[in-house]
Amino acid sequence: MTKRVAVMGGTRFVGAAAVWELVGTGHEVLVAHRGVHELEPDVALDVAEHCLGDREDLLVEGGPVERFGPEVIIDTFGGGATAAKGEQLVDAAARCGAERLVVVSSCDVYQAYVDAGLGDGSGRKLLPPTPLPIFESSPRRIEPYPGATSGHDNVAMEDAVAEFSGTVVILRPGAIYGPGDYLCREWPLVRRALEKRKELKIPAAGVQIFHRVAVERVAHALVAAATARIPDVPHPWACNVVDPYDWTYAGLAAEIGRLLDWEWEPKEVSFDEAIHPWRVTSPLVVSDVRLREVLAIPSGRPDPRDALAATVRWYLEHGPNPESPYLDW
Ligand SMILES: NC(=O)c1ccc[n+]([C@@H]2O[C@H](COP(=O)([O-])OP(=O)(O)OC[C@H]3O[C@@H](n4cnc5c(N)ncnc54)[C@H](OP(=O)(O)O)[C@@H]3O)[C@@H](O)[C@H]2O)c1
């Protein structure tokens, strides 16, 4: 079943992967963004419409999104999610007569993420109360995400989009990785291996888990969310988007070493002595049952081992994004 789908964003990392898959599966796609990041030329040929402007102008009454008449609107909330952006999206969707909203939120809505010390680390708890894995029904945080900039708050956005009267699918990805990633969390490990630095500081036995997800799996989820039969209750319907399995930090380092034919000399250090992008005081393991059973994304799409290999190959070919916050870690 193909649909008319308007994608807000869609030219950078997650959105670009989803647009590629949407056009490849025959959907009629409008891509709406500012024009700072562009579509790949071959994808640009296949989209039904492509319009440029700030989201205010794209979603305005009588504006390009409304004129397209989408059945589904996908919003990746480029530049950060806020309640105001969520409200604006709901108003536009109602005027368009859209039947469904699909929005990209994050696992950062869960209180367990704050308790594990993500964000600015201020919320660390030694006895985190949320049992693992984290389900969609696990408690969300009630305070803004610690350290968030420009008002970015996925909880506020989720509450705003819940006001839409049609179907609302909220996707909550874990830490996204893959070709085209601009954060580049895996880069510090790849860089050390390329620079032939044997010593690897492993804090607290390297048992940290901060559940990751391949960008390809997020794209599959976005495309499935546009058409899958979604339960009426609960409204809005949330779905975690994570890999079917993951490695601890030490395990990920070992896997990247294997891919680059590199032997580490691990040095055990205390938690405070080494920083890395998966540094959490308690593990964050997230359930993907809804992703597999309702959105029908099987475990092997893709296998994390293959997705990690593709990511490492991408680093070798392109290098990291020069604006990655982890460039010099
Ligand atoms: N990376 C992770 O580990 C992770 C984990 C969980 C959730 N997430 C969430 O995933 C979402 C998608 O991320 P992403 O990496 O694909 O994209 P992103 O960089 O957040 O968004 C970029 C897209 O939005 C467009 N855009 C940005 N500001 C805009 C504006 N004011 N008006 C209109 N369009 C605008 C960009 O195109 P132009 O620049 O051309 O406008 C581009 O197409 C984000 O909301 C992020 O919070 C990420």
Image (spheres, rainbow, N blue to C red):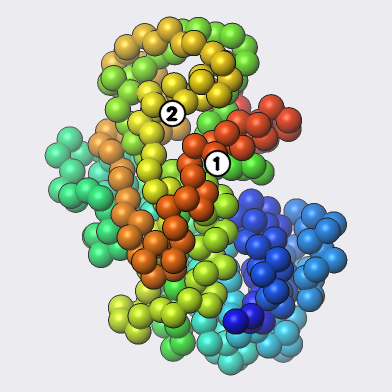
Residue 247, quarter of picture:
top left
* 240 relative to 314 in the view: left or right: left
Q: Quadrant of residue 2?
A: bottom right
Residue at the image position 36 percent from the left and 9 percent from the top: 267
Q: Secondary structure at mark 1?
A: helix
Report whether 130 appears left or right of 169. left
Q: Residue at x 80, y 55 (%)?
A: 40
Quadrant placement of the N terminus: bottom right
Residue located beneath label 2 in the image: 252
Can the viewer see residue 176 in this picture? Answer: no
Q: CA distance from mark 2 to mark 1?
A: 13 Å
- Identify which residue is drawn at 79% across, 76% down: 48
Ligand 1: does it lie within 8 Å of the C-beta at label 1? no
Residue for point 58% across, 71% down:
74
Question: What label does residue 298 carry, if any?
Answer: none
Q: Quadrant of residue 270?
A: top left
Q: Is residue 275 left or right of residue 95?
A: left
Please, is residue 144 above or below residue 245 in the view?
below
Q: Is residue 149 above or below residue 207?
A: below
Number of marks in picture = 2
In the drawing, what numbered circle is on residue 307? 1
Residue 260 percent location from the top left of the image: 58, 20
Callout 2–callout 1 Cβ contact below 8 Å: no
Of the residues shown, which amino acid type is indicated by label 2?
Leu
Amino acid type, callout 1: Ala
On the image, the x and y values in percent for residue 282 come to 25, 36
